[in-house]
Amino acid sequence: MGRMDEAVACLREAAMLAPLVPDLHLNLGVALMHLGRLAEAEAAMRRAASLAPRHPAVVKNLGMVCLRAGRFDEAATAFQKALKLDRAGPDTAALYNNLGVARRGMGRLDDAVPSFRRAIAADGGLVDAVKNLSMTLTDLLRTDDALAALDRGLARAPQAAVLHAQRAHALKERGDSKRSTT
């Protein structure tokens, strides 16, 4: 049995011994999600949500399970609720980024852009949000805007290889193949 499986067994035992403690169900759900056992993770998250419906971490992680399961509408709803519950919390940037990913998954690219921008405003060093924003802008054929976002992101995180790679892709899409290798 791997360490994560062992952790799941311990958390299951703890949740059985103290079934009214939402954090035990939350932690069990997170562990199960990391193992890719999404149905079980969702059940644990829903149990936590039934015990603590206004707990931002519970709502956020329920959204993550839905996102990983490809249920983008449900994920977006969960991330919006988590943002309302904890608007200025430490997860604000990640929540906006995840909301953008969910909207992107729903094909709502124009709605995803402001979510990614809010994520970057909350944490300018959030490389995933910069990458997601630039991918979305490129898909919307707004390549110059994508490159501008990438340049701002690279000014904050010059070692972020993924941003350099995304910049090369955006330059290629724009037709600047000569500059895309720099």
Image (cartoon, helix red, strand yellow):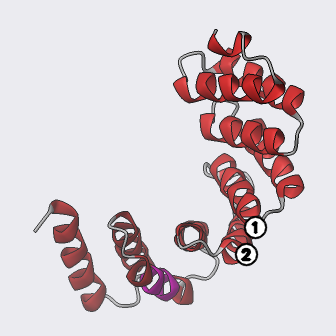
Which residue is at 52% across, 86% downward? 46
Q: Residues within 10 Å of mark 1 (few under 14, many from 20)?
A: some
Q: Tell me if residue 169 comes above or below residue 180 in the rendering.
A: below
Residue type beneath disc 1: Met
Residue type beneath disc 2: Asp
Q: Nearer the viewer, residue 144 or 37?
A: 144
- Where does residue 172 sit, x and y in percent of width and height? 73, 25
Q: Tell me if residue 139 comes above or below residue 4 in the rendering.
A: above
- Where does residue 34 sit, x and y in percent of width and height? 36, 63
Q: Quadrant of residue 125?
A: top right
Q: Circle 2 is placed at which residue position? A: 73
- Where does residue 104 sit, x and y in percent of width and height? 75, 58
Q: Tell me if residue 119 comes above or below residue 175 in the rendering.
A: below
Q: Nearer the viewer, residue 34 or 84?
A: 34
Q: Quadrant of residue 36?
A: bottom left
Q: Quadrant of residue 147?
A: top right
